[in-house]
Amino acid sequence: MTAPDKPKRYVFLLIPGFSMLGFTCALEALTLANRHASGRQYYTWRLLSADGGPAAAWNGVTVQVDDGLCELKRDDTLVVCAGEDVAAGSTKQVLAWLRRETRKGLSFGSLSSGAYTLALAGLIAGKRISTHWEYKTALVEALPRVSIEDKIYSVDGRVFSCAGGASSMDLMLHLIHEDYGSEISDWVAEQMVYTAPRDHSHSQRIPVQDRTGVRDRKLALAVETMRNNAEEPLSPDEVAEAVGLSTRQLERLFAKHLGTSPAKYYLSLRLERARQVLRQTELSVAEVSVLCGFVSPSHFSRSYKAAFGVTPSKEAGGRKLLWAAKGG
């Protein structure tokens, strides 16, 4: 395919604390596409920050940008890049700018937790979106009108999103393919030494079989059943029945392959979910206790401290992802 007369322009809005890995993977894909045809360009890009000054990634690296919240064109593609501190950067000024510019009909999307900024701006209600799995629970609680998929990336009309990290490569390869076809996207993948690009159907989390080296289908199904029933935990008997085993058979599987009992493993899943919610939302300890299936806040507190060495109250007092962002 010949290069276009007019290259497509991507505009990256860097929210302070953005993920350097996700941003770099996305930008590098566009950069490599331009190498496909000598002397011609498939893409151009501009980097923006809220004030036009350098933007600091979560790892402390500072990136120089081209402009502040400037006016965009209808044929631009806007990408919101964020990370752990997305709430602090989702100011009234940024949200108003996003609403104004996206009304022009341009395509837009997000990397990692940038979906939160788009949601606060009211731009993805009813849309299917992806964000990093670590933020999913908090976003579900804070933004119930947004449909969050457990996929590496999602495309819903002119809105796209991804989990960040390496999934930014998969998303950009998909977008390059949509723009210019498989010849260019395959060439870029080879240049990135990315020999097995993933489509949107891939889950973000490593399957329990791969994570543990266990290939037992019944065990994997039992773990998934536990994950899907955190708020109202099932008994070991109910989990066993759900996967077609006796309780004793289930206990043997967990002891053999995971070195623990079903009850202890279930508890660890619920406590890990509680830690994510405490760190990323403003829900009270009592609310998180209920959300993660504990009979009382006192039982929750004891279990949490035994697992993580701190009380839920102390954890909640630390830095959070989604604090007071609704006004900025």
Image (cartoon, rainbow, N blue to C red):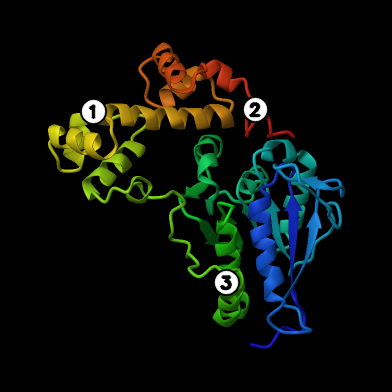
Mark 2, Cα crowd under 10 Å, few <14 / some 14-19 / many 20+, is some
Cβ–Cβ below 8 Å for labels 3 and 1? no
Under tag 1, what secondary structure? Answer: loop
Q: Mark 3 vs mark 1: give the one in front.
A: 3
**x, y (%) of residue 276?**
51, 32
From what the image shows, is residue 49 above or below residue 258? below
Q: Quadrant of residue 229?
A: top left
Q: What residue is disc 3 on?
A: 189
Q: Determine the residue positioned at 57% across, 82% down.
A: 183
Give the residue pinned by disc 2.
319
Q: Is residue 141 left or right of residue 26?
A: left
Residue 269, position in %: x, y?
A: 38, 32
x and y percent of residue 316 in the render? 58, 22
For the residue labelled by badge 2, is the local secondary structure a helix, a strand or a loop? Answer: loop
Give the amino acid at mark 3: Ala
Q: Is residue 121 above or below residue 310?
A: below
Is residue 98 rendered to the left or right of residue 268? right
Q: Amino acid at mark 2?
A: Arg
Q: Are marks 2 and 3 in contact (CB under 8 Å)?
A: no
Identify the residue at horizontal 80%, vertical 54% (top origin).
48
Q: Which residue is mark 1?
A: 235
Q: In terms of image quadrants, where is residue 325? A: top right
Label 2 to label 3: alpha-carbon separation: 37 Å
